Amino acid sequence: MVINGPNLNLLGIREPEYYGNRTYDDLVMSTREAASELGCETEFFQSNHEGDLVDYIQKAYFDHYDGIVINPGAYTHTSVAILDAVKAVKIPTVEVHISDVSSRDDFRQISYIREACIATVMGKGFDGYVDAIRILLEELA
Ligand code: CA2
């Protein structure tokens, strides 16, 4: 399950210095193709609403998904609800950020979700999602 949070539907529209020129649809297509070459079936979900993201983390549990790749967007830096959901489902989860959040604003240095994740990938653009899938495959092997 590949989950993306608020404003990531705007990819390719603004802020190319952080997020590149490609769109959300490009992200879905290129990640799905690379995942398929690695033997993985993927489902993608994007929402601007915190509770929807929690619902999809729970869906990954109820529908028996093997792993979660999640870019919670700005909710990374604020959401205890998303942290609690990832902790509760006990599914291996990798946190992804397109930009290198470690070299950005102070408020982006806090990640609530990180302690519940097996790894964090940041600053690798769209390729970071494929790296996250590889990390999950190693974990699950
Ligand atoms: O680097 C990332 O992937 C982030 O998770 C993206 C979030 C940001 O709040 C995090 O600190 C880091 C924001 C996504 C906003 O995406 C946009 C894309 C195009 C235009 C405007 C926003």
Image (cartoon, rainbow, N blue to C red):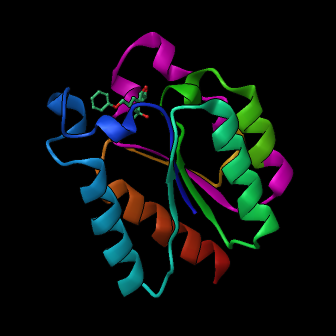
Nearest to the observer: residue 140 or residue 27: 27
The x, y position of residue 84, in whole percent, is 81, 38
The furthest residue to the top: 106
Residue 8 appears left or right of 69:
left
Q: Is residue 99 visible?
A: no
Where 132 falls versus 4 (above or below)? below
Q: Could you tell me how many numbered marks the image carries? A: 0
Residue 63 figure quarter: bottom right
Residue lying at 46% horizontally and 88% vertically, measured from the top left: 39
Location of the N terminus by quadrant is bottom right
Nearest to the observer: residue 6 or residue 137: 6
**Residues in magenta?**
87-114
Residue 123 figure quarter: top left
- Does the magenta segment cover residue 112? yes
Where 137 falls versus 56 (above or below)? below
Residue lying at 52% horizontally and 40% vertically, measured from the top left: 47
Question: Which quadrant of the frame does ligand 1 lie within?
Answer: top left
Location of the C terminus by quadrant is bottom right
The x, y position of residue 90, in whole percent, is 81, 58
Residue lying at 14% horizontally and 42% vertically, measured from the top left: 21
Q: Is residue 63 visible?
A: yes
Residue lying at 24% horizontally and 37% vertically, measured from the top left: 19
The x, y position of residue 71, in whole percent, is 49, 43
Residue 85 appears left or right of 93:
right
Where 21 falls versus 42 (above or below)? above
Residue 72 appears left or right of 16:
right
